[in-house]
Image: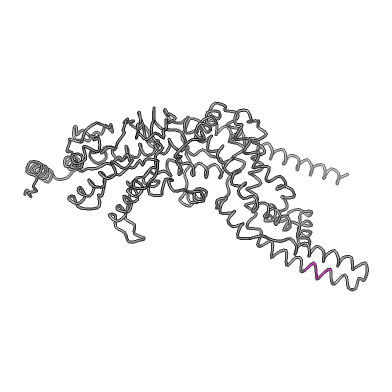
Amino acid sequence: MEMLVFLIVLFAVFLYVMIRGSIEEKKSKQAYRERLRTLYGHFSDKTYTPEQLDRIARFYMHRQQENDIDAITWNDLSMDTVFERINFTQSSSGEEYLYAMLRQPILCDKEGRQDYMEKHIHYMMEHEKERLDTMMLLHELGNTGKYALFDYLDYLDKLGVRSNLPHYGCILLLVVSIALIFVKASLGVPLVIAVACMNIVTYMKEKGIAAPYVTTFSYIMRMIKCADSILKMGYSAELGEYTTSLQENRKKFKDFDKNSRMVLMMNVSAGSMDELLFDYIKMLTHIDIIRFNQMLYMVQKNRPAIMRLTDNIGYLDAVISIGYFRAALPYYCTPVLTDEKLLQFSLQDGFHPCIDNPIANSFDQNRGMIVTGSNASGKSTFLKTAAINAILAQTIHTCTARAYCGNYFRIYSSMALRDNLDQGESYYIVEIKALKRIIDAADAKQSNPLLCFVDEVLRGTNTVERIAASAQILESLSYKNTICFAATHDIELTHLLEKEYDNFHFEEEVRDGDVLFSYRLLEGRAHTRNAIKLLEIIGLSKNIVERAERMAGRFLENREWTFIN
């Protein structure tokens, strides 16, 4: 009787723990779903370490093309920060796909890819329940861990084709030795022991080889489960082409999940008695190693399908993320892109997506512009705003502006450069190389026009040579199917290139001992000279400031420098 009571109590405790765990898990999911709901309309707060960003970029590195956003432009524009601002993805597939999307502006859209994506973004923005349901599925898919899926697949390729014949041989030897016991026990028993030892030693060696790669199978299994769940949600009417593609790629792995649990549990230590017994069975028969090799063959054979499945899931995750980004913006527009030969690049009330309370600016250009103004007046931020919007227009079909119109551009920049100490290169050498790649791109015989942004051309050298060389470089870019936006302090360039470039400027006002910036783009060249005045505001000697002003004024009158004591 006491034993029965004990068993009932034990069962009741076990049942309570199970129910409590289920309730807590349900509450956790509900809380996370509510968090996703309340995040809508706000910017993402995700941040990544350099190591994590390197892992995310691996997907893109396997598919990069000639006219992608190169590393210099990506770093110039702080596109990692833009990516973090946009990124609401819930899975590795999603964040890797979104990152790759931002690195690869489309150069034509004859297949209507952006209209296709726009329909899906709009659907997810308009249907909260479906959006949250999908995000929860993607959240369950989760991340691949330390490495990208591409890295794991590359590691699997290194294993090569692995035959199961040795393992079938181990099973056959075990069966024969056991059968021999019934014929001649004195010979059968020692043989069983010897075969069992051999099988265990062989198993441990093979498990050591296979175990590190189980993570790959685990993520693929979760992708398959995620795909199945998405297909069950009945998106066929709204996302018809998408679900068809997802279904076709899912079919390639029809039997992949069969008996896969024992492979996925390969790295898990035995707990209960039955699990311990099953471990010994696996050691003697190698059945999990056999299944591992079968799954390995299926992955190696269907690697393209895995990539397409990753694309399918990553695309949907990215689409939802773009919708979240749009909802967080004060306003946005979908771009008007053209492949006409006439150059056009216009932005109405465009702003930088990573600046809180930004100042919006507008322009409508069919040729380049030179932007002048003092330090901190807004020149660099304006160039970055224009460049980032051009990238967003040709990637996520979303611009931080009221209107955007432009060609399908190849986009380059030379802005936030620095010395390359690893290769022993000065700033000037780094700058020349950055400019050369832009000139080479302009010289390349490609149908897509070039859109480039240059901040302070050749700032790493002396005034005379800088102006002479800058004028020639910018002039050469003005007629090669190129729109160039250049920021400079050298007013001389605005006169030398006024036939090739439009002049715009930013200005500031010195009032009551303070400098006030409007950050508004104005037509014409800069006409204020407040750089020396800023010295006084910061606190330098009034005597130094006055003499500097007299020197500058005399130079402007006589075009000749004279030192003033």
The secondary structure that dominates the magenta segment is helix
**Residue 532: percent from left, percent from top:** 16, 42
**Residue 284: percent from left, percent from top:** 78, 62
Judge left or right: residue 98 versus residue 219.
left
Residue at 60% over, 36% down: 136
Colour treatment of the image: one colour
From this view, report whether residue 403 is shown above or below residue 206: above
**Residue 238, picture quadrant:** top right
**Residue 351: percent from left, percent from top:** 36, 33
Judge left or right: residue 461 versus residue 424.
left
Most extreme residue toward the top is 126
Q: Please tell me whether residue 195 belongs to the stretch shown in magenta.
A: yes
Most extreme residue toward the right is 183
Q: Please tell me whether residue 239 belongs to the stretch shown in magenta.
A: no
Between residues 392 and 483, which one lies in front from this camera angle?
483
Between residues 441 and 503, which one lies in front from this camera angle?
441
Q: Magenta residues? A: 192-197
Between residues 301 and 185, which one lies in front from this camera angle?
301
Most extreme residue toward the bottom is 186
**Residue 451, picture quadrant:** top left
Residue at 58% over, 32% down: 132
Judge left or right: residue 357 versus residue 459.
right
Between residues 388 and 516, which one lies in front from this camera angle?
388
Q: Looking at the figure, which quarter contains the N terminus?
A: top right
**Residue 93, picture quadrant:** top right
**Residue 243: percent from left, percent from top:** 62, 35
